[in-house]
Image (cartoon, helix red, strand yellow):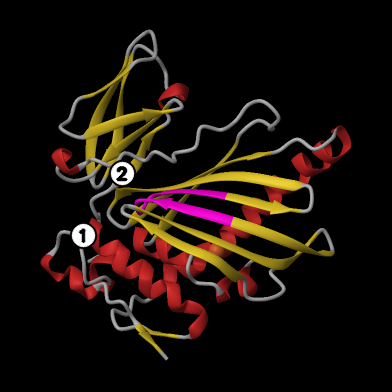
Amino acid sequence: MSIIADSYPFERYPHCWYFFAEVRSMRRGSCHKVRFCNETYDLDIDRNGNPTLRAELATVMVDGRMFAYWGDPKKAIAAPSTAVTFPQEGWSQTFHRGYNVKTHIQEIVENAADLAHFQCLHHYVDIPTVDAFTIDKTRFTVNMRAPRQMFGLTTHSVLDTTYDGLAVVETDIVARDLSVKIMLTGTPRYDDVLELNLWFSLKKCGPLRDLFYRAVVPRMMTREFTNDVPIWENKIYKSRAVLCESERNIALVRKWSRQFYEDPKRRSISSGVIS
Ligand SMILES: [Fe+2]
């Protein structure tokens, strides 16, 4: 029995859009086996690079990446509109990191609202201040700011994060003259293994600075991201979580998340209890 099946009182694969495949980097003129939500799908890429998925899944292409909807295709009305098309002009190349993590996508969603963890895991000097938390149907946005340690200095940083459904996340981070645009996706591949993909690009700000940032920021991003992994892999889901004041938005995120679950037990995604 898997950890996920034992620990979460709701379905393993909620109904929403997920990153499916990086079509533009796949070999043309061949059929590819793609694992998705414990099923294997045939994805044909023709000689011109056009994809055809042999399945009854709703799909959409954004910037050479295929996204697939897990669930009733007729209900797949809100495609991931914020799936990032990385800007070319004025930005660096796009960096990519991929990880397999044994966790549930719900943990990735609640991460954004878990303010205290930014101070514990991500070199923030203080718990971030939330300027706005906005819910818009299948999306929510958190705008926050906090001082953080960066390159040995305390720097004022601003983070704007939008979840487009449970599994496509766009984040903009600005700290001094460093601007980073990030897309994070979570894709259930098999059993309780979630494939996390992180793409990011840096805004150009001058030749010397660009050289420096391109050398250090990818390593910094890798370190920051992998700090979360052991937490995600060892969290125990509490339906009736007791939340402190800085975790207030976790209750809102849980309530918002219910729309992606069809299991009759979805009420187990409680809104939490503020202590
Ligand atoms: Fe984190």
Query: Ligand 1 shows up in which quadrant of the image?
Result: bottom right
Out of 10 and 169, give the one closest to the viewer. Answer: 169
Asked whether residue 235 appears in the rendered view, the answer is no
Whether 61 is among the magenta residues is no
Nearer the N terminus, badge 1 or badge 2? 2
Q: Quadrant of residue 66?
A: top left
Residue at far left of view: 264
Disc 1: which residue: 261
Q: Is residue 256 above or below residue 270?
A: above
Q: Is residue 154 above or below residue 248?
A: above
Residue at 34% in and 51% down: 165
Residue at 86% in and 32% down: 207
Q: Quadrant of the C terminus?
A: bottom left
Image spot of residue 120 (x, y percent): 62, 75
**In the drawing, does residue 263 fall left or right of residue 35?**
left
Region rendered in magenta? 160-171
Image spot of residue 98 (x, y percent): 51, 44
Q: Which residue type does callout 1 highlight? A: Tyr
Which circle marks residue 17 in the picture?
2
> In terms of secondary structure, where does tag 1 sit?
loop
Residue at 20% in and 61% down: 11
Give the distance between the C-alpha atoms of the residues marked 1 and 2, in whole angstroms. 13 Å
**In the drawing, does residue 176 fall left or right of residue 194?**
right
Image spot of residue 146 (x, y percent): 68, 68
Residue at far bottom of view: 275
